[in-house]
Image (tube, grey):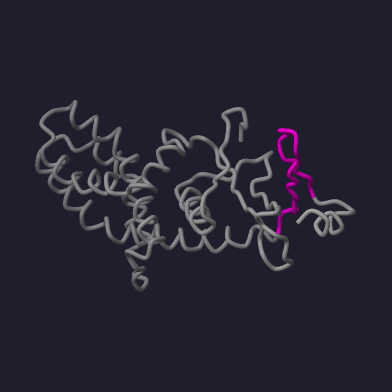
Amino acid sequence: MDVGIGFRAVSGDKDDRIGFAAAAVSVGFDLVEETPCVSNVYSDENKYEPDKPGDVKYFLPLSKGAIEVSDLAKVWIDPGKALNDAEALPARIKSAANAQELAALCVEFDSIYIKAAFAHMRLFSLNRIKLPSHTSDEDNASAYLDSFARKLEDAHDKSGRTKLAKSLAANWKPAMVSWLRAYRSNFLELSNLWKEVPKSLKIKRGNGLPPLVLPQGPKFEQMLKRWT
């Protein structure tokens, strides 16, 4: 991955940052190579204990295809708009009056779909929705919607668009459930990544100097006892 595009360290409340990072990974964002990917820093605010993480951050690229991580952050903060945009899709498909409106839908669909999946992950993280029992149509529904924009391109008549709108509605919920299962799996994995990364120690300095962050080394235990 080209680090030149920039990256952002996910911060915030511990569970919230794990949730956001897990949701981003679920929709295709990879932790940035040639960075720590995950950092684990102990300090005065995050005292060292052998079985507890320090200040854990996840490093994500600023964008993935047409979606920017800042767009996902907006959905995470307020998932309502993403859900409303998704809810309007069937009506927009059926009412597309000309080739231009249909082309706009084809361009917008994947972004609306991904953001809606992200919004569902947010609601799941807040315990506002639950994960139902596994059903056999989840994977098929997810695969169907992954290629839905291409199907829209071929819907030149009203009857074809009406049929697609019905298929979208029928596959929507099982596809969202599939996304939630991916999110849950990634959340568990990211929750434990801090155990596998080198520890660092952040030491405050006076005279207006920025903190000093020291990676794990031969005298790391002694420094921890002295500075935290």
Depicted 126 relative to depicted 82: above or below: below
In the current view of this chain or complex, which residue is farthest to the top? 100
Looking at the image, which is closer to me, 163 or 8? 8
Q: Which residue is drawn at 32% across and 51% down?
A: 144
Residue 76 point in image, percent of width and height: 39, 48
Is residue 65 left or right of 123 when viewed as pictured?
A: right
Is 198 one of the magenta-colored residues? yes
Is 167 one of the magenta-colored residues? no
Q: In which quarter of the image is residue 114?
A: top left
Is residue 27 left or right of 101 when viewed as pictured?
A: right
Is residue 57 left or right of 138 when viewed as pictured?
A: right
Is residue 122 left or right of 17 when viewed as pictured?
A: left
Looking at the image, which is closer to me, 103 or 181? 181
Residue 126 point in image, percent of width and height: 38, 61
The stretch of residues the image draws in magenta is 196-215
Q: In which quarter of the image is residue 33?
A: top right
Q: Residue at x 75, y 54 (%)?
A: 199
